[in-house]
């Protein structure tokens, strides 16, 4: 739901019931009743029979509550702002402005007192706002949160502290709730992928041509989780590093053929679970020589994702997280440039 949607769609004569409004907002009727009980965000009047009927003004106030909590504002503060907005002269109404980070009693700058129904723990308020928007299936708010997070914090921080924790929480909720929340994960994943690819396309458009060997990024056979590699691919593009993104579930033969044809500076392999961790394939790539006779070399292999064991084998690196992978790849590139300047490689 787009929280900027005009309230004219709500019948003004009779108002709407709590159940109807809850379905429109993507929240439970219990949530609306809780907001009424705790914060006074309820219908101004009740029809005969004491049934709640929400007028357009009531709905506008709740929509503002949803908008503010979607950007990480704790419910108590969001409720006060929504009520203040409803009591202003309509000709001068405009959304209240709040900082995106609010300290709580624990002293953590990333803690938020608002809940999303997802097992998030202590994270940035923007992460909880993103999760709430996803649970509501509010596509416009999800995209706005993602765009703002990447623009404000940069891709690496946004991925590690906002996007990835929200994705992981949705995945855990899906696993514990059966088929519920599948639509939430699909919505969030699609918008995250769209946002990351926009970063990549923008960075690649300004990247100068280079003769340096690219970094190959691929999911191992049977592995479809590409978002972490998409984030790394975009982050490398921002750093003007040439990449070859092969995507999900790359067959072993195709991956080996790409290594021989391209001669990559490094190969990044992603495995989400131990069931897909193809250690023999990783070892084979790490020991594969390529290049012209007399100047043959090998590519370093980075094992990324939770599927791999903790201890890498010779020729392999085991970064934990996007930032650490970038640091390792930067170090490899620096060593390669130094060796090339010394005449050790062609």
Image (cartoon, grey):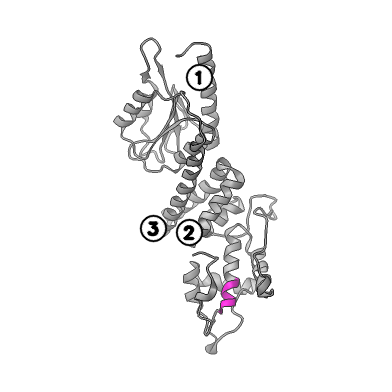
Residue 5 sits above or below residue 159 on the image: below
Q: Residue at x 59, y 61 (%)?
A: 69
Q: Residue at x 66, y 73 (%)?
A: 91
Give me the disc on residue 139: 2
Q: Looking at the picture, how far across and down is residue 70, in whole percent? A: 57, 59
The residue carrying mark 3 is 178
The image quadrant that residue 59 belongs to is bottom right
Q: Out of 340 and 47, give the one closest to the viewer.
A: 340
Q: Out of 178 and 298, give the one closest to the viewer.
A: 298
Q: Residue at x 44, y 22 (%)?
A: 315
Give me the disc on residue 305: none
Magenta span: 55-61
The residue carrying mark 1 is 336
- Disc 3: CA contacts within 10 A as few (<14), some (14-19) or many (>=20): few
Cα–Cα gap, marks 2 and 1? 44 Å
Q: Secondary structure at mark 3?
A: loop
Q: Looking at the picture, how far across and down is residue 225, in whole percent? A: 40, 43
Q: Secondary structure at mark 1?
A: helix
The image quadrant that residue 312 belongs to is top left
Q: Closer to the camera: disc 2 or disc 3?
A: 2
């Amino acid at each position: 739901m787009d929280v900027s949607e005009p309230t004219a769609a709500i019948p003004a004569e009779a108002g709407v019931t709590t159940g109807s409004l809850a379905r429109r907002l993507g929240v439970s009727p219990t949530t609306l009743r809780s907001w009424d009980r705790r914060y006074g965000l309820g219908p101004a009047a009740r029809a005969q029979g004491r049934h709640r009927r929400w007028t357009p003004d009531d709905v506008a106030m709740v929509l503002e509550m949803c908008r503010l909590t979607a950007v990480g504002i704790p419910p108590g503060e969001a409720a006060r702002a929504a009520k203040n907005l409803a009591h202003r002269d309509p000709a001068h109404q405009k959304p209240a402005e709040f900082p995106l980070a609010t300290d709580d009693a624990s002293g953590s700058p990333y803690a938020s007192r608002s809940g999303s129904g997802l097992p998030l723990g202590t994270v940035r308020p923007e992460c909880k706002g993103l999760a709430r928007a996803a649970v509501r299936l509010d596509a416009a708010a999800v995209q706005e949160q993602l765009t703002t997070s990447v623009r404000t914090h940069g891709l690496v921080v946004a991925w590690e502290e906002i996007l990835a924790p929200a994705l992981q929480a949705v995945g855990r909720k899906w696993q514990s709730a059966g088929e519920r929340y599948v639509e939430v994960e699909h919505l969030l994943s699609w918008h995250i992928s769209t946002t990351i690819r926009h970063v990549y396309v923008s960075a690649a458009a300004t990247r100068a041509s280079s003769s340096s060997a690219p970094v190959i990024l691929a999911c191992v056979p049977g592995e479809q989780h590409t978002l972490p590699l998409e984030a790394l691919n975009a982050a490398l593009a921002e750093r003007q590093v040439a990449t070859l993104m092969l995507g999900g579930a790359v067959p072993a033969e195709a991956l080996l053929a790409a290594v021989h044809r391209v001669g990559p500076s490094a190969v990044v392999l992603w495995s989400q679970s131990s069931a897909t961790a193809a250690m023999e394939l990783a070892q084979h790539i790490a020991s594969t020589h390529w290049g012209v006779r007399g100047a043959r070399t090998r590519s370093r292999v980075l094992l990324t994702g939770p599927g791999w064991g903790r201890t890498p084998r010779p020729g392999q690196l085991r970064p934990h997280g996007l930032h650490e992978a970038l640091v390792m790849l930067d170090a490899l590139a620096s060593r390669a440039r130094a060796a090339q300047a010394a005449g050790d490689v062609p």
